[in-house]
Image (cartoon, rainbow, N blue to C red):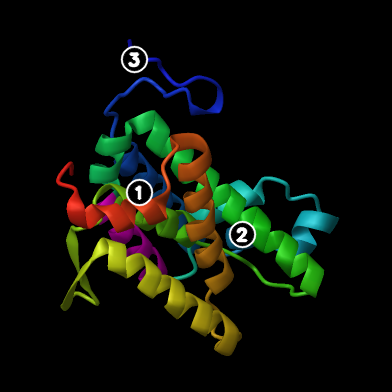
Amino acid sequence: MFNQPKGIRKPFPHRDLNFTVILIGINIFVFFITMVIPRSEAYLGLNPGTFLYYKFYWTPLTYMFTHGSMSHIIFNMLGLFFFGPQLEHRMGSWEFLTFYMTSGILSGLFSLIFYIIVGCNVLLVGASGAIFAVLLAYAVYFPNTKVLLFFVIPIKTKVLVPLFTAIELFQGIFSTNDGIGHLTHLVGFAIAFLYFIIRIGLNPIKAFRDSGKSTWQ
């Protein structure tokens, strides 16, 4: 008899509720608000100063729905649009939403702690931490699916994830003033990796390694 996982691995009821569309809608709505009221970005973005001294304790949540430019939100929402629906269907909507929110919030909190330690006063905005987590999760479930890197180069998702990790590491070390949260991107990957091990009970590295001999997807 099959035993259902218990405790932290107890699964949510599998439902298809289109949370991906809702998340995209919230991001677009918040972006519209920040365009109409530019000052609102300072109240929604994650900043060490406002978090510590003005007690903006909501910002580890709101930063991930706030974007600094049109290109910023387009890039992130395209990633969510292309990878989110299929991943949500595979995981189930409640699991997907929990995964997305956990990855985004913890990516922000880890980045915030780092910025406080090094004394870096930045305003962190964007869904990139959660989007990078979604990319890793998609690669775990669909490792041999090919996507177009830069809309030109076909590449398997199980290759894309380590490639992006290497790129983010390189840029994080050598491009410290480019205004991009490379640390948050990497933390998104790391949180997703740990989520799969702790919550799902699946090792992403093993999934990538075994994908060449498996036809389950």
User: Which is closer to the viewer, label 3 or label 1?
Assistant: 3
For mark 2, what is the residue? 45
Magenta-colored stretch includes residue 78: yes
Q: Quadrant of the N terminus?
A: top left
The answer to whether 171 is drawn above or below residue 95 in the figure is below
> What secondary structure is the stretch in magenta mostly built from?
helix
Task: Using a 10 Å C-alpha cutoff, classify the residue at mark 3 as few (fewer than 14 neighbours), some (14 to 19) or many (20 or more).
Answer: few
Query: Which label is found at residue 174?
Result: none
Q: Earlier in the sequence, mark 3 or mark 1?
A: 3
Along the viewing direction, whichever of 214 and 68 lies nearer the viewer? 214
Residue 139 in sight in this render = no
Along the viewing direction, whichever of 113 and 204 lies nearer the viewer? 204
For mark 1, what is the residue? 24
Q: Position of residue 192 (x, y in %)?
A: 47, 51
Which residue, as the protein is rendered here, is positioned at the far right? 53
Residue at position x 70%, y 61% from top?
112
Q: In the structure shown, which secondary structural element does the residue marked by tag 3 occupy?
A: loop
The answer to whether 12 is drawn above or below residue 89 in the figure is above
Q: For the magenta stretch, what is the residue range?
A: 70-83
Task: Identify which amino acid the numbered label 2 is placed on.
Answer: Gly
Q: Quadrant of residue 93?
A: top left
Query: Which label is found at residue 2?
Result: 3
